[in-house]
């Protein structure tokens, strides 16, 4: 029987690779579109990139679930962040992205406000926003989890970056001003967030090896 630590490490590596594949597909799809657009528009109904974007989100969900399982032992030390675990937050984020993948926005991905309101766009937007928020919360939880200082610092920096960049892009979208710059911000936030998940997954896979090396050096 495979030891639990090795099994979790293997699952974490597989999860990281699936998440990395998701990011590659998103960028490849984005580079095929000559106009400026928000990331969600890649999956809008009628877009040539719709199926590729859906596949990317599903790979992100699958990989995220595997990484979440592998880090289920992590828990933040601060009182507020201890309400739940990074694994739970990642699972909720994956659920949001799963909904967003299966309920794409309509052509152009209009904001679900005023005359452009549709249940479909509202569902997609709400799922995507909650998924991003849950992912940022998971980053903060990992940032304040004991025992892994380097990953904690990286997680804190990435959480602040994703939160600030995504918020700025969202505000530009709501204001319907400088959409090109806002779309760039959203793509950067998406890249940083997915990149964080890849790094955490690979780092989690390396922890058993690090512990073994520490133990050997102590001997």
Image: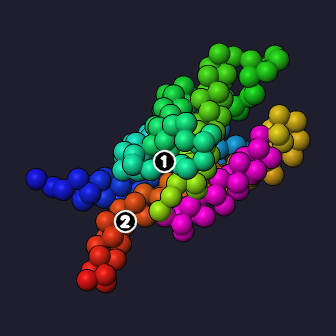
153 or 106: nearer the viewer: 153
- Residue where numbered disc 2 is placed: 207
Provide residue 138's location: percent of width, then percent of height: 55, 46
Residue 39 shows up from this direction: yes
Q: Residue at x 26, y 83 (%)?
A: 219
Residue 135: image quadrant is top right
Q: Quadrant of residue 215?
A: bottom left
User: Which quarter of the figure has residue 6?
Assistant: bottom left
Q: CA distance from mark 1 to mark 2?
A: 16 Å
Q: Nearer the viewer, residue 64 or 152?
A: 152
Return the residue nearer the eye: 50 or 211: 211
Tell me, yes or no, whether the highlighted magenta stretch contains residue 156.
yes
Left or right? Give the position of 29 relative to 70. Answer: right
Q: Magenta residues?
A: 148-170
Q: Is 202 drawn above or below residue 114 in the view shown? A: below
Circle 2 Cα neighbour tier, 10 Å, few/some/many (<14 / 14–19 / ≥20): some
């Amino acid at each position: 029987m495979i030891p639990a630590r090795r099994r979790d490490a293997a699952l974490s590596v597989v999860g990281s690779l699936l998440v990395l594949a998701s990011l590659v597909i998103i960028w490849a799809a984005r580079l095929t579109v000559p106009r400026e657009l928000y990331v969600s528009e890649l999956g809008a109904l009628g877009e040539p990139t719709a199926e590729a974007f859906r596949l990317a989100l599903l790979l992100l969900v699958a990989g995220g679930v595997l990484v979440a399982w592998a880090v289920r032992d992590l828990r933040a030390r601060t009182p507020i962040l201890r309400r739940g675990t990074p694994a739970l937050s990642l699972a909720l984020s994956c659920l949001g992205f799963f909904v967003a993948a299966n309920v794409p926005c309509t052509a152009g991905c209009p904001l679900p406000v005023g005359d452009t309101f549709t249940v479909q766009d509202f569902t997609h937007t709400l799922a995507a926003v909650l998924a991003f928020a849950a992912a940022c919360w998971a980053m903060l939880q990992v940032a304040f989890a004991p025992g892994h200082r380097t990953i904690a610092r990286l997680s804190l920096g990435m959480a602040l970056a994703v939160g600030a960049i995504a918020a700025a892009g969202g505000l530009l979208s709501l204001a319907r001003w400088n959409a090109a710059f806002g779309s760039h911000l959203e793509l950067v936030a998406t890249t940083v967030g997915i990149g964080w998940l890849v790094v955490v997954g690979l780092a989690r896979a390396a922890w058993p090896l690090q512990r073994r090396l520490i133990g050997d050096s102590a001997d």
